Image (cartoon, helix red, strand yellow):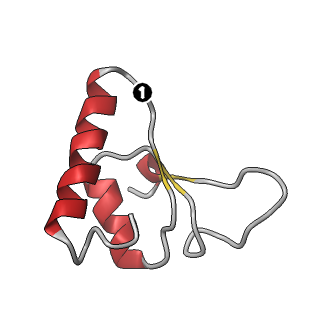
Amino acid sequence: MRNMLNDRKDMAFVKTLAILAAEFGIQTIAEYIEDEDLLKAVHALGIDYAQGYHTGRPMPELSTCKLSELG
């Protein structure tokens, strides 16, 4: 995820995985979401959840941001 906005190969890889997961009904979690631009990009790709410093500091329990709730 980290470099997908700067590298078209990384973007293609993430996009392909998101499409494949959706076809199989598998929910996806994007890790290393460090800023708003990256959060918006993974949301646009249809990824279900996001995790990283932009969504919250690390905690003992799993903390994710459900992207469908962003609007």
* Amino acid identity at mark 1: Ile
Q: Position of residue 71 (x, y in %)?
A: 38, 56
Please determine whether, in this image, residue 60 is positioned above or below residue 24: below
Compared across the picture, whether 62 is left or right of 49 comes to right
Compared across the picture, whether 51 is left or right of 26 comes to right
Closest to the observer, 56 or 7: 7
Please determine whether, in this image, residue 24 is positioned above or below residue 21: above
Which residue is depicted at the point 56% across and 60% down? 51
Compared across the picture, whether 41 is left or right of 48 comes to left
Q: Position of residue 32 (x, y in %)?
A: 51, 67
Please determine whether, in this image, residue 29 is positioned above or below residue 8: above
Which residue is depicted at the point 73% across and 50% down? 62
* The quadrant where residue 58 appears: bottom right
Q: Report the residue that reaches farthest toward the top.
A: 24
Q: Mark 1 sits on what residue? A: 26
Q: Report the residue that reaches farthest toward the front.
A: 9
Please determine whether, in this image, residue 23 is positioned above or below residue 52: above
Q: Quadrant of the N terminus?
A: bottom left
Which residue is depicted at the point 29% across and 41% down? 17
Q: Position of residue 57 (x, y in %)?
A: 71, 73
Q: Position of residue 40 (x, y in %)?
A: 33, 66
Which residue is depicted at the point 30% across and 45% down? 46
Q: Report the residue that reaches farthest toward the right.
A: 60
Closest to the observer, 16 or 39: 16
